[in-house]
Amino acid sequence: MSSLQLSAALLVNPLPALLLAALFIMVMLRLSFRQREKASVRRHRRYQAAAARVLEKLGTLPGDGQRMRYLRKINPYVFEELLLLALKRQGLTVVRNASYSGDGGTDGQVIIDDECWLIQAKRYSRAITPAHIRDFDQLLEQRTCCGFFIHTGRTGHMSRAVCSTSPRLFIISGQRLMDLLAGRHSWLSGCSYFQRKSV
């Protein structure tokens, strides 16, 4: 078909040309939008998708020991998203940070009984660092709120001592972490704060 014949055909029936032009414009707009989307937004979306896959994978592992070993190997940012996803699936309101670095010492927030709780997530393979516990406790004191220090490591005596002197800091690890990720509300009932509140 010559260009003259094509022009004549389009004059007789312009609908295919208009549809093709509209499709081209839509594709170009979509590509333009994706390029303008911030890299941090794409990264958040990627880590959230990875967290959903990790949560699904955890359900297939035969025991808590295997689950904890698996958690200790995942990306630290995926671990943060995993915790926020698990909290959200329990019907709690979750507030995500805009970025993973420069977050002011918190990795997110959760609203429980109309109170804002800060979250610090640490994917450790060994014992946690008492200095991290102290820093988080100071942050909680500055912001006059409570918080959860959630980790995959071991909680040593010094870290437990720091935590035991703070009325606002609660460590979630071991079985309580497994309960949280499995969707069991028992992770929360272990906190003395909620035990006092329910009396």
Image (spheres, rainbow, N blue to C red):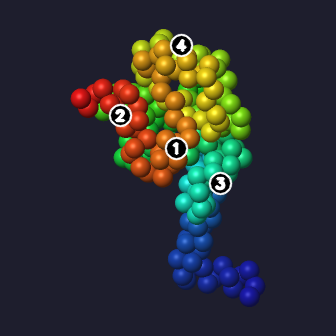
| Residue 106: quadrant of the picture | top right
Of discs 3 and 2, which sits in the foreground? 3
- The answer to whether 122 is drawn above or below residue 10 in the figure is above
Name the amino acid type tagged 4: Gln
Q: CA distance from mark 2 to mark 4?
A: 21 Å
How many other residues sit within 10 Å of disc 1, few (<14), some (14-19) or many (≥20)?
few
How many other residues sit within 10 Å of disc 2, few (<14), some (14-19) or many (≥20)?
few
Asked whether disc 2 touches disc 1, contact meaning CB atoms under 8 Å apart, the reply is: no
Q: Residue at x 48, y 22 (%)?
A: 169
Q: Which mark is residue 66?
A: 3
Q: Residue at x 56, y 54 (%)?
A: 55
Asked whether disc 1 touches disc 4, contact meaning CB atoms under 8 Å apart, the reply is: no
| Residue situated in front as seen by the camera: 75 or 35 | 75
Q: CA distance from mark 1 to mark 3?
A: 13 Å
Mark 1 element type = helix
Question: Sequence order check: which comes first, mark 1 or mark 4?
Answer: 4
How many other residues sit within 10 Å of disc 3, few (<14), some (14-19) or many (≥20)?
few
Q: Which residue is label 2 attached to?
A: 112
Residue 146 spot, x, y in % from top left: 43, 22
Q: CA distance from mark 3 to mark 4?
A: 34 Å
**The furthest residue to the front:** 157
Of discs 3 and 4, which sits in the foreground? 3
Name the amino acid type tagged 1: Gln
Q: Which residue is label 1 attached to?
A: 175
Name the amino acid type tagged 2: Ile
Of discs 1 and 4, which sits in the foreground? 1
Q: CA distance from mark 1 to mark 4?
A: 26 Å
Q: Which mark is residue 138?
A: 4
Q: CA distance from mark 3 to mark 2?
A: 30 Å
**The furthest residue to the right:** 2
